Amino acid sequence: MLAILSFAFVVLNSKVVKSEFKQPGGIPAMFPPLLTKSITVSGSLSAYQFNTSREPTVAIYPKKVELNMVYNGIDDETWPYTRILATLLNNVCQIKDANFSTNLIEQTYSSRSLTPAVNLGGNAGTTVSKRQSATRNGCLVKVEVDGARWHTINTTISPAR
């Protein structure tokens, strides 16, 4: 099932190009066989977990896609979070630039925390709450980081308004 939910126009090299958010239908088809398995996420149309070291999940909702993972700075070498996100952005938003996802996540981590830092002591680290977003090709991409040394990173892809 592939439905067009929203569209926008972007000017590239003096050409008008139609860009659109495309509701993904087949997440497993975007990735190598056996990389994902179907899971249940409340309220989602479908959801998948990646068979990588941090087991990130992607959930498809009406008009948005969410990718999240519990993270501590160490990620899977073959299919890291940024590569999974770049693949989703390519298929959902036609964003071909693989550096877009890496740069957005790096900007998020280098930004200021929205809440005062609290040192949890020992090896637990210091709490952070960070947000960053960007619009490209008719898609709004929001990255949220919450927690301490072990924290949640959540990326939402939705139509730009």
Image (spheres, rainbow, N blue to C red):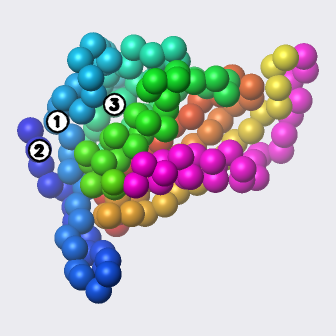
Find the distance from the CA under tag 1 to the CA under tag 2. Answer: 6 Å
Give residue 44's position: percent from left, percent from top.
28, 30
Q: Which residue is mark 2?
A: 2
Q: Secondary structure at mark 3?
A: strand
- Point out the tag, 3 or 1, that comes first from the N-terminus: 1
Give residue 98's position: percent from left, percent from top.
42, 49
Q: Which residue is mark 3?
A: 59
Find the distance from the CA under tag 3 to the CA under tag 1. Answer: 11 Å
Picture quadrant where residue 74 is located: top right
Give residue 135's position: percent from left, percent from top.
43, 63
Q: Is residue 130 above or below residue 42?
A: below
Q: Are marks 3 and 1 in contact (CB under 8 Å)?
A: no
- Point out the tag, 1 or 2, that comes first from the N-terminus: 2
Q: Are marks 3 and 2 in contact (CB under 8 Å)?
A: no
Q: Residue furthest bottom?
A: 14
> From the viewer's perspective, is 150 left or right of 97?
right
The mark lying in front, picked from 3 and 1, is: 1
Q: Quadrant of the N terminus?
A: top left
Q: Is residue 100 magenta?
A: yes
Q: Amino acid at mark 3?
A: Ala
Q: Residues within 10 Å of mark 2 (few under 14, many from 20)?
A: few
For the residue pair 96 and 22, the one nearer the viewer reads as 96
Q: Are marks 1 and 2 in contact (CB under 8 Å)?
A: yes
Q: Which residues are magenta?
A: 97-122
Q: Which residue is mark 1?
A: 25
Q: Secondary structure at mark 2?
A: loop
Q: Residues within 10 Å of mark 1 (few under 14, many from 20)?
A: some
Identify the residue shown where x is 32% and y is 81%.
13
Q: Amino acid at mark 2?
A: Leu
